[in-house]
Amino acid sequence: MPSFDEALQRAGEFGRFQRRVFLLLCLTGVTFAFLFVAVVFLGSRPERFWCRGPGAAALAERCGWSAEEEWNRTAPERAGPGSCQRFLLEAADATATATATANANANASAAAAALSCADPLAAFPNRSAPLVPCRGGWRYVQAHSTVVSEFDLVCANAWMLDLTQAILNLGFLAGAFTLGYAADRYGRIVVYLISCFGVGVTGVVVAFAPNFPVFVVFRFLQGVFAKGTWMTCYVIVTEIVGSKQRRIVGIVIQMFFTLGIILLPGIAYFIPNWQGIQLAITLPNFLFLLYYWAVPESPRWLVTRKKGDEALKILRSIAKCNGKYLSPSFSEITVTDEEVSNPSFLDLVRTPQMRKCTLILMFAWFTSALVYQGLVMRLGIVGGNLYMNFFISGVVELPAALLILLTIERLGRRLPFAASNILAGVACLVTAFLPEGTPWLRTTVATLGRLGITMAFEIVYLVNSELYPTTLRNFGVSLCSGLCDFGGIVAPFLLFRLAALWLELPLIIFGVLASVCGGLVMLLPETKGIALPETVDDVEKLGSPPSYKCGRKQKAPVPGAPL
């Protein structure tokens, strides 16, 4: 009975049909990138913000001040561009505070009249009203409205912006397990279409959320469905091409993720509010529902579900589209890959080599996501032209895929993997200590760090799948990549909270983690030029030194066999 791979080879492993489906599904990477990093623009910090009490608000209305004039006259100068306190300009309270010997029952209107439009602080003896904590009434000076100004995520509530990105990544993590399981049980394309619809609906609710709790809940759900779109499109693409093309399509599809990074600043620049940006990055997902008529179910999955007749029907359509012919002899097909029933984490750490690979790969996934998201979000707090800086950082990612394709077959996987992490780590550490007066040098070094971590992020996908046996590959990759989402949960808190102490402190953390990761991945076995392992025993033999006899490489003897 012919195998599925043999039937696919006859039908065409990367013909016109696969190229069409590949291009259509790659567009999912663009919209997933939008959501992945949109917080930089959705939650950008206002240029200026300050707290306005009832007295200041009434005075501004009476005097007809613009936001700029109100800032100049009533915002505490000693508090910097963002004040978490306000002047006590309420009429009665101001009078009682300014002069202790004055009549406490002074007429409020008389006190209010003392607050001059030209100089509201003239009513105070030292021309400096007392400062009190803010309890609402924030005022913002900004070009575009953002989530920060919509829900007042400043000062004591600033951590809530970190929470929005952490919640999104928590949704990614939940989606990886729930929708990953659903795709294995109910089919790839049906889960893909449901996920696209889910991203669209939840994204619209996020855009019109009436309050912060609703915003957070539906952002979590959007993360769940978005991970479903990304995972299933990636799986479908790799399952409909031949084994020789899987590596290149797996890397090229991530170039469309980079394309999304490049397009996002343009979208954010021309749309003046965060709701519009949210809709622009969400609504294209509804267009993907048209794939119901363009993208079939994965025939490989159909075979694993004992639906060989449906799989053959799709394979014959593929062959016809590719200008091939699938002979009637292919009446039944099988899939050679066999999965372990109910695999567990213990299967990944029971033997020494598997344990080493699992722990290192989990750390690599965590570090790649943490450093990558941290560097992206950092663009929103370092100043300068956010749109141009974000665009340039996205363009820098494009050579990453090309460098990977040029190096992994020549130098192997391990060396480029380690070098890219070390490059990212060293660049982060150097950038942290470069003087402020050299912006061009800081930008150049930081750009190299972004290139390095992008390469590391893309290589870990490939290395992870090559280091696990067929019997544990899907489970192992899913488990390890879950650390990617955990890194994304940690990233915003680590970046914004530590940057509040010292702007460069997160870079030092990123640099140390990436450098350590670069050293650890050198301990992994090299997989260049070897067949994918089928069993745990095959993995244990990876990296074992070959035995030699009379100058010729020999196979290692089987234990118990005669020499």
Image (cartoon, rainbow, N blue to C red):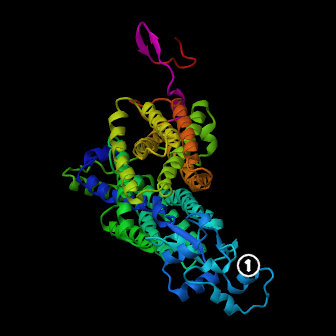
Q: What is the three-letter code of the residue carrying label 1? A: Ala
Quarter of the picture containing the N terminus is: top left
Q: Which residues are magenta?
A: 535-554
Q: Is residue 528 above or below residue 386?
A: above
Viewer can see residue 533? no
- Horizontal arrangement in the rendering, residue 17 relative to residue 495 (left or right): left
Residue 529, horizontal then vertical, whole percent: 38, 29
The residue carrying pointer 1 sits among few (fewer than 14), some (14 to 19) or many (20 or more) residues within 10 Å by Cα, namely some
Q: Nearer the viewer, residue 194 or 223?
A: 223
Viewer can see residue 168? yes
Residue at the spot 56% in from the left edge and 50% down from the top edge: 503
- Look at the numbered disc 1 and give the secondary structure of its residue: helix
Residue 545 counted in the magenta span = yes
Residue at the spot 43% in from the left edge and 44% down from the top edge: 438
- Horizontal arrangement in the rendering, residue 96 relative to residue 177 (left or right): right
Residue 149, horizontal then vertical, whole percent: 53, 72
Residue 402 counted in the magenta span = no
